[in-house]
């Protein structure tokens, strides 16, 4: 770990300064996280009177449970579709804004505000637009002979949550892509233009490779976002249904634990989720560290 | 741009205009819905032009809430959200800046341990450890309180990480000069470090305020008392009753009110907010 060359020597002051954060972290983070690990090895009877240690049984049961494996696969599909949709749209908009120098501030302002919209609110907005009875979009789709009802069709429910989750994330990706684009040296572009490369060719051969660190960073951030923060989107639109068609991993932790009161299974799922995040974060850290040295 | 291509410029603006419209459309529809009478929705597809029931919808939600939907007046929920978001933003910044100061500017025993205890939280959002955290908060008797709403969300090291990164870029000479002048560590912190961190603090404040405002799952779990409902979770209550009584105008009025404060913060503090975000990256 890096430090300053010269530092203060003091016995108590640093602990005093660290105390508030350490206290909050220990009480509200380390303790619950270790509780989750502990109860993932236990079974509690339905009335909560008796807890027995059962080792890895919860894990074994989860990993053999088709509904968990389905949720895992579904979460992966959901994560990939939201990430591709929101990053693709954001990149297109960022490239456009980067082209129009004079009005870029104006467009940026109009594009960034969804960042401040709560995921659950994004869910409500799209749920309203797609409402089978009074929504505008099902009405439009009807002209094309598509019968929209996300309460019945699992695929349509999945499309709904993907659109709602991606819509909210576009502004975030847009800002990072714009920042990345603005740090591309203009001289490179000019040189390529003099060599006769068309704008599209310049983008694919020069700009896009230079954006790859940003793209990779956003990839990790977006996957994290889709896996956890989209709880609100799903809860507001489909509630995991129809059937289990939109049940993602986090939503399952919640329904099994809060509604189903199956604490052992829910905790084991939490621990597995933590594992997934740690792997993702590790990749991100490795990458960020490397990037700083560029 | 390098050369002038009128067609491409036109296309660029076209794409941007479509983009802005797509981004704004759901919010426009919500706002329009909030200005109509409930009867406007019975007839089928919802209208696209404003109605004349705007003041009634907003007035009713703000002042008295909607008893069928089981929500208190919206002003109360807005107040709770404001308290929660401010507590999270201020609390996080306050504890983070001093702990980052300790980690960067002091050499002491267990420094690495403290560092790792704090920084491991970077990895896990509250959503994955939701049930045990709920148990802890319940044991401490913090259900239905502002402390219960805010404290578990403060327990994350993002801000500490950012301050640490920033402090690492501060020239060593500043600290050495202040030490030569006989200033104590806390004097250095107050008179030099704090003033040069003001922009970072402000940028973080915007990000953290929004983070606190948009929280949903956590408030949903820890509050059962109407007096502590936040606006974002209050929407859930309204949604639950929407199948029985389609008071779309009231629901959409609440949704619009829930969006307004954080969106205004982003629009007015855009520069700071962008700075705060792009610094998270590094």
Image (cartoon, coloured by chain):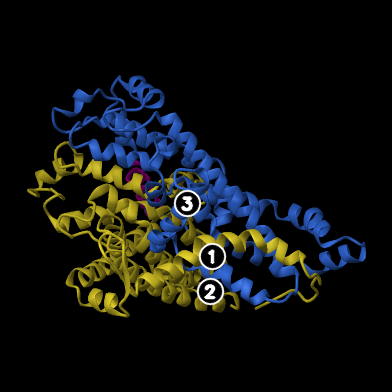
Chain colours: A yellow, B blue
Determine the CA span between mark 1 and mark 3.
Answer: 25 Å
Left or right? Give the position of B150 relative to B30.
right
The residue marked by circle 2 belongs to what chain? A
Q: Residue B281 carries which label?
A: 1
Front residue (pair B46, B233): B233
Confirm whether the magenta stretch covers residue B18: yes
Q: Quadrant of residue B49?
A: top left
Mark 2 packing: few (<14 Cα in 10 Å), some, or many (20+)?
A: some
Q: Which residue: 18% across, 60% down?
A: A244
**Towards the viewer: A236 or A150:** A236
> What percent of the width, then of the height, locates residue A57?
27, 78
Q: Is mark 1 on a helix, strand or loop?
A: loop
Label 1 marks a residue whose chain is: B
Quadrant where the N terminus of chain A sits is: bottom right
Q: On the same chain: label 1 and label 2?
A: no
Q: Give the range drawn in magenta.
A: B8-25
The spot of residue B152 in percent (x, y) is 50, 55
- Mark 3 is surrounded, within 10 Å at the Cα level, by few (under 14), some (14 to 19) or many (20 or more) other residues, namely some
Residue A125 image point, x, y percent: 30, 42
Instruction: Decide which of tag 3 and tag 2 comes sooner along the chain.
Output: 3
Q: Does A115 appear above or below B186? A: above
Q: Do the residues labelled 1 and 2 touch (CB within 8 Å)?
A: yes
Which dot marks residue A288?
A: 2
Identify residue for label 3: A100
Secondary structure of the residue carrying numbered label 3? loop
Label 3 marks a residue whose chain is A
Q: What secondary structure is marked by label 2?
A: helix
Could you tell me which residue is drawn at 25 percent across and 48 percent down?
A237
């Amino acid at each position: 770990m890096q430090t300053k060359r010269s530092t203060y020597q003091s016995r108590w002051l640093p602990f005093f300064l660290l105390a508030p954060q350490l206290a909050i972290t220990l009480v509200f983070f380390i303790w619950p996280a270790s509780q989750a690990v502990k109860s993932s090895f236990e079974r509690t009877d339905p009335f909560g009177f008796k807890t027995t240690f059962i080792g890895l049984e919860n894990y074994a049961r989860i990993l053999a449970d088709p509904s968990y494996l389905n949720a895992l696969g579904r979460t992966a599909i959901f994560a990939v579709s939201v990430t591709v949709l929101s990053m693709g749209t954001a990149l297109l908009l960022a490239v456009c804004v980067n082209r129009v120098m004079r009005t870029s501030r104006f467009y940026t302002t109009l594009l960034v505000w969804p960042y401040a919209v709560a995921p659950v609110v994004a869910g409500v907005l799209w749920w309203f637009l797609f409402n089978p009875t009074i929504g505008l979009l099902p009405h439009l789709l009807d002209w094309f002979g598509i019968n929209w009802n996300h309460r019945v069709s699992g695929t349509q429910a999945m499309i709904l949550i993907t659109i709602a989750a991606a819509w909210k994330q576009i502004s975030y990706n847009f800002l990072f892509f714009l920042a990345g684009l603005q740090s591309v040296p203009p001289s490179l572009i000019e040189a390529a233009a003099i060599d006769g490369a068309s704008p599209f060719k310049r983008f694919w051969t020069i700009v896009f490779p230079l954006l790859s660190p940003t793209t990779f960073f956003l990839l990790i951030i977006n996957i994290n976002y889709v896996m956890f923060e989209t709880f609100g989107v799903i809860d507001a639109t489909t509630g995991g249904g129809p059937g289990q068609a939109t049940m993602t991993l986090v939503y399952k932790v919640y329904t099994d634990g809060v509604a189903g009161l199956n604490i052992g299974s829910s905790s084991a799922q939490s621990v597995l989720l933590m594992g997934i995040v740690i792997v993702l974060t590790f990749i991100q850290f490795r990458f960020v560290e490397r990037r700083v040295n560029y | 741009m390098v050369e002038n291509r009128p067609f491409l410029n036109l296309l660029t603006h076209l794409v941007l205009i479509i983009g802005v419209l797509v981004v704004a459309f759901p919010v426009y529809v919500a706002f329009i819905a909030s200005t109509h009478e409930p009867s406007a929705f019975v007839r089928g597809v919802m209208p696209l032009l404003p109605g004349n029931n705007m003041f009634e919808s907003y007035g009713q939600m703000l002042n008295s809430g909607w008893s069928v939907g089981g929500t208190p007046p919206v002003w109360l929920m807005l107040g709770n959200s404001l308290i929660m978001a401010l507590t999270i933003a201020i609390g996080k910044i306050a504890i983070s800046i001093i702990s980052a100061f300790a980690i960067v500017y002091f050499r002491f025993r267990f420094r690495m341990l403290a560092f790792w205890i704090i920084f491991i939280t970077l990895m896990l959002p509250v959503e994955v450890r939701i049930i045990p955290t709920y148990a802890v908060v319940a044991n401490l008797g913090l259900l239905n309180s502002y402390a219960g709403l805010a404290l578990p969300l403060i327990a994350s090291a993002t801000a500490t990480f950012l301050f640490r990164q920033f402090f690492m870029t501060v020239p060593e000479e500043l600290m050495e000069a202040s030490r030569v002048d006989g200033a104590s560590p806390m004097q250095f912190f107050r008179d030099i470090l704090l003033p040069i961190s003001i922009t970072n603090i402000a940028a973080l404040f915007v990000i953290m305020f929004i983070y606190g405002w948009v929280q949903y799952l956590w408030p949903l779990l820890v509050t059962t008392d109407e007096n502590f409902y936040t606006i974002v979770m209050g929407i859930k209550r309204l949604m639950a009753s929407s199948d029985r009584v389609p008071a779309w105008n009231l629901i959409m009025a609440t949704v619009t009110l829930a969006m307004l404060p954080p969106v205004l913060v982003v629009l007015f503090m855009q520069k700071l907010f962008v700075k705060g975000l792009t610094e998270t990256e590094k």
